[in-house]
Amino acid sequence: MKKQWCIGKLDGQYLANMEDVLDLYAQEPAFRKARICFDERPCQLLGQVVAPLPMKAGKPEKQDYEYTRQGRAVILLAYDIDTGQRYVQVREQRTKKDYAEFMEWLAKAHYSQVEQIELVQDNLNTHTYGAFYDHLPAEQARALAQKFNFHFTPKHGSWLNMAEIEFSSLARECLDRRIESVERLQQEVVVWSENRNAKATKIHWSFTVNTARLKMLSQYADVNEANSTYNN
């Protein structure tokens, strides 16, 4: 099975954001610093009209083709590059308040001893330091903003976010069936994350700035002719 992304137009800003993220991935782990990839994914909640027929020997569970829409939910996921741990929450919405509360929870519950969190994320309009100030007292918001250093993937650059790989695993192992409520989705997602965390499942990333400049030489040259002579 192939996974495909729309890479989008490569301009100077795309290359700048891409190389910033790749530079971060290439760094060695540092004392009291965490490298985190964050993303969100909406999910349609679906209920059963007719109770499914249970699985029998040699036969899978059968479910009716009809279903009821039970609303939507959003999964928020943070993946730690260095420890192979992931932290998840399920929320009913994807707002600045949800984002700020998740980041505050992440920092306090899991990274209280860390001085700096390098955070890779897309440039959704809720992913700002301003979201902290909108929903936290200024003193708390400032402290949280100082703890995070944002690294934004380029537009159409989701392939650069390791959290996307985690979501692919989650979709295969957990989201391939009907889930009718936020509470049930939360239970399923937490079990999935605990299983992967127990194995400390890590993503081995090999695409570097140098690889990008070689494999995407023509695109670099389109942005700036001076790049056409690049060689390792």
Image: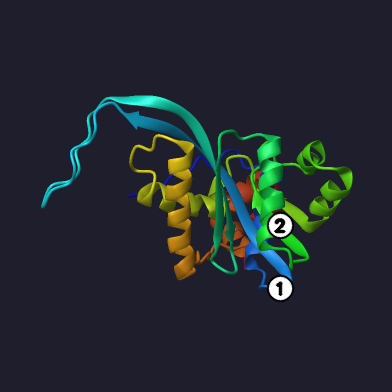
* Residue appearing at x 70%, y 36% in the figure: 96
Label 2 is placed on what type of residue?
Ala
Residue 15 on image: x %, y %: 67, 49
Name the residue carrying label 1.
30
Name the residue carrying label 2.
107
Residue 157 on image: x %, y %: 58, 45
Which numbered marker is on residue 191?
A: none
Residue 97 on image: x %, y %: 70, 37
- As helix, strand or loop, the secondary structure at mark 2 comes to helix
Work out how far the residue at label 2 is from the one at label 1, CA to CA, in angstroms. 17 Å
Q: Quadrant of residue 93?
A: top right
- As helix, strand or loop, the secondary structure at mark 1 comes to loop
The image's colour scheme reads rainbow
**Camera-nearest residue between 191 and 121:** 191
Q: Is residue 37 above or below residue 180?
A: below
Quadrant where the C terminus is found in the figure = bottom right
Q: Residue furthest right?
A: 139
* Residue appearing at x 47%, y 41% in the figure: 183
Query: Which marked residue is nearer to the observer: mark 2 or mark 1?
Result: 2
Q: Is residue 142 above or below residue 93?
A: below
